[in-house]
Image (spheres, rainbow, N blue to C red):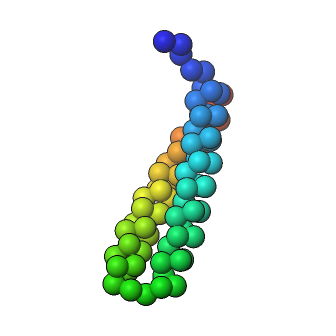
Amino acid sequence: MPTLSLIDMQLDLEASVAHLESLSQMLTGHALYLAAFQTPCHHEDLKLVESRVGGLALSIQDLKAAALKIARRA
């Protein structure tokens, strides 16, 4: 199995961040849609989507920090 260079790892992390940011943006839009239609079912879905967006935000922050650490070493 080939080993990745630090630059390759940094690029992979940055690509993952871009993908997760796109997913977060889509889920945020879905949350806005759910919030516009206040039904009991949508309320539960909204809470779930908002929870997922929060988790993605933490993951994005962690990946950005890791990419920055790699960039400083490379």
Q: Residue 49: which quarter of the image?
A: bottom left
Q: Residue at x 34, y 79 (%)?
A: 41
Q: Residue at x 57, y 70 (%)?
A: 29
Residue 10 spot, x, y in % from top left: 61, 34
Which image quadrant: the C terminus? top right
18 with respect to 63 (left or right): right
Of all residues shown, which one is farthest toward the top? 1
How many marks overall? 0
Residue 33 spot, x, y in % from top left: 53, 77
In front of the other: 19 or 11: 19
Residue 21 spot, x, y in % from top left: 59, 55
Q: Residue at x 47, y 85 (%)?
A: 37
Q: Residue 11: which quarter of the image?
A: top right
Image: 27 above or below 10 = below
Q: Is residue 34 visible?
A: yes
In front of the other: 44 or 10: 44
6 with respect to 49 (left or right): right
Residue 51 spot, x, y in % from top left: 40, 66
Image: 20 above or below 8 = below
Q: Is residue 69 visible?
A: no
In front of the other: 7 or 44: 44
